[in-house]
Amino acid sequence: MELKRARAIAEKLVEKLAPYCERIEIAGSIRREKAEVGDIEVVAIPAPFADALLPELIPGARFIKNGSRYKQIALPEGINLDLFLVRPPVQWGVIFLLRTGPAEFSHKAVTRKRLGGLLPSDCQVAYGQVWRHEKVIPMPEEEDFLKLLGLPGLAPQERGRHV
C-alpha cells in the first residue's frame, strides 16, 4: 500500500485507540517513511483492561493473532495491523526501536558486538528487555537503547545504513 494511504489509516487507528493507552505510536515502515508499506505497525502501552475493547474499537477487523503482547489484525481497508503491547512500560525504548526496524537493523541491535552486532557483549535482549549480568536495564525511551548501541540520535530513515 502507498505510504500516504497507510499513514492515514494508521493515524485514524492511533487516534481511536489513544484514549485507551498510556502511550501509543506508529512504528515500522510508516515511521521510516518507506514509499510502499506492507503492514501497519503500532506500539502501545495499553491502559488496564483496554485489550478487551479492541474488537469494538476496530469494527470489521478480524483478529489473526490475539496474544497478550502481540496482536495481528486484518483491517477492512485491506492491510494488516501489527499491534505490539509493551509490558512493562519501562521497556518502551527496546520495543519501539525493534518494531520500527528495518528487520536487519533490529537483528543487529539485539546481536552482541563480538558476534558482529551493535549490542554490548555483556548484554543480551530477552523478552523485550535488555539484560546485563542478570539485571534488567530500563529503556523507557528509544534514545536510551540507541545510546547503549552507540548510535545516539539515529533517525528511523537512517537505520538501514547501519546494517
Image (tube, rainbow, N blue to C red):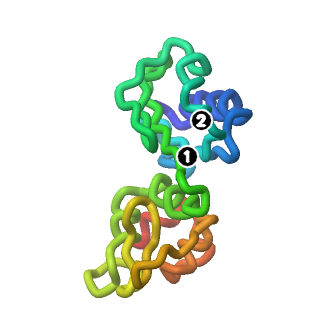
**Secondary structure type for disc 1:** strand
Indicate the quadrant where residue 49 lies.
top right
Q: Residue at x 55, y 31 (%)?
A: 51
Going by the numbered disc 2, the residue's amino acid type is: Arg
As drawn, the residue found furthest toward the top would be 60
- Place of residue 26 in the rendered image (x, y in percent of width and height, measured from the top left): 59, 44
Going by the numbered disc 1, the residue's amino acid type is: Val
Report how far apart the C-alphas of labels 2 and 1 lie in the structure. Answer: 14 Å
Q: Is residue 125 above or below residue 42?
A: below
**Secondary structure type for disc 2:** helix
Return the residue at label 1: 43
How packed is label 2: few (under 14 Cα within 10 Å), some, or many (20 or more)?
Answer: some
Q: Is residue 116 above or below residue 20?
A: below
Return the residue at label 2: 7
Does any portion of residue 31 appear in the rendered image?
yes
Q: Residue at x 59, y 45 (%)?
A: 44
Viewer-nearest residue: 93 or 78: 93
- Place of residue 103 in the rendered image (x, y in percent of width and height, measured from the top left): 36, 57
Indicate the quadrant where residue 125 lies.
bottom left
Viewer-nearest residue: 162 or 90: 90
- Place of residue 117 in the rendered image (x, y in percent of width and height, measured from the top left): 34, 78
Q: Residue at x 66, y 40 (%)?
A: 47
Mark 2–mark 1 CB contact (< 8 Å): no
